[in-house]
Image (tube, rainbow, N blue to C red):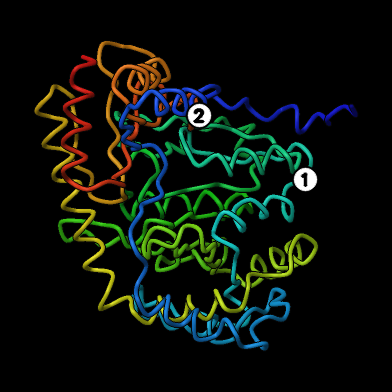
Amino acid sequence: MPRTNRRFDALPPFPLAGMKEMRRRIETEGVDVIDLGAGDVPLDPPPAVVARLREVAGDIAHSRYAFQTGLPAFREAVATWMDRRFGVRVDPWTEVLPLIGSKDGLAHLPFAFLQEGDSAIIPDPGYQAYLGSVTLAGGDPHLVALRPDNDFLIRLDDVPEEVAARTGILYLNYPNNPTTAIAPDSHYVDAIDFCHERDAILAHDHAYSEIAFDGYRPRSVLELDGARDVAIEFHSLSKTYNMTGWRLGWAVGNQSLIAALSKVKTFMDTGQYLGIQAAGVAALESWAEWVPGNVATFQARRDCGVAALSAVGFDVTPPRATMYLWIPVPHRELSEDFARRALEQEGVIVLPGAALGAGGEGYFRVALTVDEARLQEAATRLGRLI
């Protein structure tokens, strides 16, 4: 077999080897498995989304290549929504780019901008697309641990100057997966200034912009002064509209960054199916009427999960955003060991913090992907582990 290249070899190993096999084995033994691992909720998308896809599925005009231009109506709907939601006005043709899910844009960005050996500052733990794409593009990932003593924010003042000086991309993700942290405006201001001073890109992963509770409304980084010069923001329909498998999102921001990302994608794909983009228009048009009810479902699950897990002995802080709980592993047990015991002994799947980077060690993540009764049952089972 041909040898893999050094960039591929630099990718971290998958930390959950054997978990899928363990699940299959215990399910064949009759164990009722409760899956709180993946952030893939089995809830319906808005009815208008399904109806729009059915309407256009037989239309041959929607079966042609989308290329990077995509569906004009989707670009325009994104621009309208950005203005309505954040007060950010963008040109739908030069400052918006349809994506095959936000991961598509996040993963392809380094191929346009990182020189060999350029640094990329990456939150740890964090979405593994950041680390993987920077590594494969030949960049130098600089992982910054997100810890509770700094509210799970990246302390830019602590980045070594030799790293800061060659930084090409700074990745931020707030509301944050997996820590559920939110960022104050001052953190974004510091990040914008950092990127201005070093001619770096601020890549803001905003996949959880709409899943927020208790009156909290996440802002777009593009609302802040100076951001349009350095920032590109990534949005997704996956979590907000229960459309994970539909694979539709967009990038928005600096015109030059959008153009470069579009050019990279030209060599990688021919765009998302136009029928899916038409359904995306229906999703954005249903935002004001439909999304609050979906968020209320997550909030009810959050409240139930926090109460149930706290009652059995876990230290759970109620998150103000995202669809997760980020919980310290009791008794200093390694997170992967705890996750294996949870599945093997109690039939509950949780995500060990270390699966999303060494900085996540000491925590596990619960995804609010089941209803309150199942969350209560999962908490009872997990409580028996401690």
Residue 38 vs 251, above or below: the answer is above
User: Cα distance, mark 1 to mark 2?
Assistant: 37 Å
Tell me: 127 left or right of 48: right
Q: Mark 2 highlights which residue?
A: 20
Task: Identify the image quadrant of residue 100.
Answer: bottom right
Residue 323 vs 280, above or below: the answer is above
Q: Residues within 10 Å of mark 2 (few under 14, many from 20)?
A: few
Name the residue rendered at 69%, 37% in the picture: 135
Q: Amino acid at mark 1?
A: Gln
Q: Position of residue 4 (x, y in %)?
A: 83, 30
Residue 105 vs 118, above or below: the answer is below
Tell which residue pokes out farthest to the right in this image: 2
- Residue 172 or residue 211, whichever sits in front: 211
Q: Residues within 10 Å of mark 1 (few under 14, many from 20)?
A: some
Give the position of the N terminus as an image quadrant: top right
Q: Amino acid at mark 2?
A: Lys
Contact (Cβ within 8 Å) of mark 1 with mark 2:
no
Q: Position of residue 113 (x, y in %)?
A: 72, 53
Give the position of the C terminus as an image quadrant: top left
Q: Mark 1 highlights which residue?
A: 115
